[in-house]
Image (spheres, grey):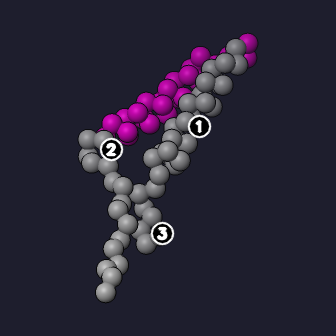
Amino acid sequence: MSKNTAPIEKENNLGTSIVLFLVIIVLFLGAIYSLSFLTLDNPWPMAVCLGLFALAFWIPQTILGRSDSAGEN
């Protein structure tokens, strides 16, 4: 008889989760802070804002993966 074993789940420990959270929050707050330099003559702060904002959402969703995928294989 063969055992039906569940796949190994990748979960971060508390320290790693806190560090990842802080990195993502710094990216997000940096995006908001860059808007304080935005003027009609200088569009670069908006470009920086969009880049940091995109990274703040792209990194957790693609690189770090999902932690709520219970029951999915």
Q: Is residue 53 magenta?
A: no
Q: Earlier in the sequence, mark 1 or mark 3?
A: 1
Of pointers 2 and 3, the one earlier in the residue sequence? 2
Q: How busy is the neighbourhood of tag 1: few (under 14 within 10 Å), some, or many (20 plus)?
A: some
Query: Is tag 2's residue or tag 1's residue first in the polypeptide sequence?
Result: 2
Query: Who's the residue at 43% across and 30% down the image?
Result: 26
The quadrant of the picture occupied by the N terminus is bottom left
The numbered mark at residue 39 is none
User: Which numbered mark, 1 or 3, is in the foreground of this view?
Assistant: 3
Q: Which residue is mark 3?
A: 73
Residue kind at label 3, given as amino acid type: Asn
Q: Residue furthest front?
A: 1
Say the numbered circle drawn on residue 17.
2
**Closer to us: 24 or 63:** 63
Q: Nearer the viewer, residue 6 or 57?
A: 6
Report how many numbered discs are placed on residues in the image: 3
Within 10 Å of disc 2 (Cα), the crowding (few <14, some 14-19, many 20+) is: few
- In which quadrant of the rendered view does residue 70 lie? bottom left
Label 2 vs label 1: CA separation? 20 Å
Q: Percent x, y for residue 67?
A: 41, 57
Task: Give the residues in magenta.
Answer: 18-41
The chief SS type of the magenta part is helix
Looking at the rendered structure, the kind of residue marked 1 is Ala
Foreground pick, 73 / 58: 73
Residue at the disc numbered 1 = 54
Q: Is residue 32 above or below residue 41?
A: below
Residue 45: x and y in percent read 62, 20
> Helix or strand or loop: what does disc 2 sit on?
helix
